[in-house]
Image (cartoon, grey):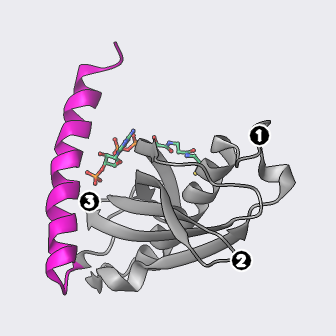
Amino acid sequence: MTDITAKLASGSKVEMTQLVMPGDGNVLGTAFGGRIMQWIDLCAAMAAQRHTRMPVVTASIDRLDFLGPVRIGDIALLRAQVNAVFGSSMEVGCEVLAENPLTGERRRCCDAFLTFVALGADGCPARAPLLLTATEEEARRVAEATARRATRLAERKGGPG
Ligand SMILES: CC(C)(COP(=O)(O)OP(=O)(O)OC[C@H]1O[C@@H](n2cnc3c(N)ncnc32)[C@H](O)[C@@H]1OP(=O)(O)O)[C@@H](O)C(=O)NCCC(=O)NCCS
């Protein structure tokens, strides 16, 4: 049976580092956006799984802003955390920083919000453990994620176009 005991938001935190290699790049000498998206999806999925300890699937990625380039040779540092849990779905926020390995200087390069859905043993959506907040920052994340979910649901109701 699935354990839906409430868990602390901080328990879902994931940090992932990637050295950006030439094979990760585009013709401009910066990281290919699709590769960064792959790393974001992985990092965020681990946060969702760390929270739920259940299989999860990516349902949607509704915000992904590239704020600046990640250069080949940089260290890409990804941080993800579950922002809010709804029913079977949850929003995970992920940020990407680019670190210059020679100077240690860090720049914020990308922010994304992803929705994951937890699956039960039958492969169908199943209730995820509730999220406990311990800080004002975590409570703010819940409020903001809840507002974004309302927009998401309204957009889905409207359908494409
Ligand atoms: C995501 C998926 C499991 C939802 O299944 P479904 O039968 O449509 O489920 P439901 O309509 O009962 O919705 C279940 C939950 O998912 C949420 N959801 C479904 N589609 C969503 C979407 N596109 N964006 C955000 N949330 C979504 C619902 O709001 C609901 O949330 P709640 O339980 O917190 O209220 C299903 O669409 C799926 O398997 N998609 C493919 C996932 C995939 O292959 N991802 C890439 C590889 S991991």
Of circles 3 and 1, the one toward us is 1
Q: Which mark is residue 87?
A: 3
Mark 1, residue position: 26
Image x and y of residue 20, in percent: 75, 61
Image x and y of residue 156, in percent: 29, 29
Does residue 1 appear in the picture of this structure?
Answer: no
Residue located farthest toward the top when viewing the structure as drawn: 161
Nearer to us in this view, 35 or 68: 68
Image x and y of residue 135, in percent: 18, 84
Could you say whether the residue bearing mark 2 is in a helix, strand or loop? loop
Q: Main secondary structure of the magenta part?
A: helix
The residue stretch that appears in magenta: 132-161
Does the residue tagged 3 have its C-beta within 8 Å of any atom of ligand 1?
Answer: yes
Image quarter for ligand 1 equals: top left
Image x and y of residue 37, in percent: 59, 49
Residue 144 covered by magenta stretch: yes
The amino acid type found where label 3 is placed reads: Gly
- Residue 32 sits above or below residue 155 on the image: below
Mark 2, residue position: 102
Of circles 1 and 2, the one toward us is 2
The amino acid type found where label 1 is placed reads: Asn
Q: What residue is shown at x 70% (from left), y 75% (from top)?
A: 101
Residue 85 falls left or right of residue 42: left
Neighbours of disc 1 within 10 Å: few (<14), some (14-19), many (20+): some
